[in-house]
Amino acid sequence: MRQILGFFSYFRENIPHFAAMAKPLADLTKKSKSSKIVCGEQEIKALRDLKNSLKQAVTTPLYIMNLQKDFNLLVDASNYSVAGVLTQSAQDGVHHPIAFFSWKLDKTQQGWSTVEKEAYAALKSLQRVKQWVFGRKVTIHSDHNPLTYLTASSPKSTKLLRWALALQEFEVTFRYRAGKDNVVPDLLSRM
């Protein structure tokens, strides 16, 4: 429940009346509640309202993508899937969502190392939004610190080397973001 609330909270600036809408779900995380979550009609309505508000924030012109501005790509990988979210920062520093995506890993991909999964998440996400980000600066945020060296040095793995070469098509910079701050792609890759 905390992961779900963290996900929506990350975009709270885009969700009108976020605190009031999320209160029934936030109440489930109180220490006085048991660890077993019991959702009633009120909690299900709150979750539905949050999902609809975020959907509306992405599909209505609350924020219009500016192709002259730089982009942020937040990525994450779990044992079974990879995910990303494309955002742009407004003048006030708020990240506005543009697109969300996730992909299931096949059996072979599930056996990859963590750095390979995280690199795959970055490359797959970039390929997904290529039409928007090509020729623009993209900062890729990941909670896997070794990924920040992918384009700075020559990887030992041939797979990572191929991907590093494929990344040269884009103007990317990798930034480490602690897992607790990488809530959106983390939730998308694990839920």
Image (tube, rainbow, N blue to C red):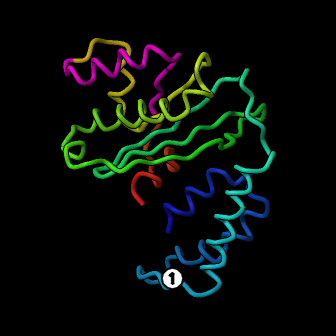
Q: Is residue 17 left or right of residue 88?
A: right
Q: Quadrant of residue 55?
A: bottom right
Q: Quadrant of residue 163?
A: top left
Q: Is residue 124 left or right of residue 139?
A: left
Type of amino acid under label 1: Ser
- Span shown in magenta: 156-176
Q: Quadrant of residue 95?
A: top right
Residue 3 in picture, x, y percent from top left: 49, 60
Q: Give the vertical position of 168 relative to 78 (above or below).
A: above
Q: Give the vertical position of 20 relative to 53 (above or below).
A: below
Question: Magenta includes 165?
Answer: yes
Q: Is residue 89 left or right of residue 115?
A: right
Residue 5 in picture, x, y percent from top left: 57, 63
Residue at point 42%, 34% (across, down): 124
Residue 13 in picture, x, y percent from top left: 74, 50
**Which residue extends farthest front?**
131
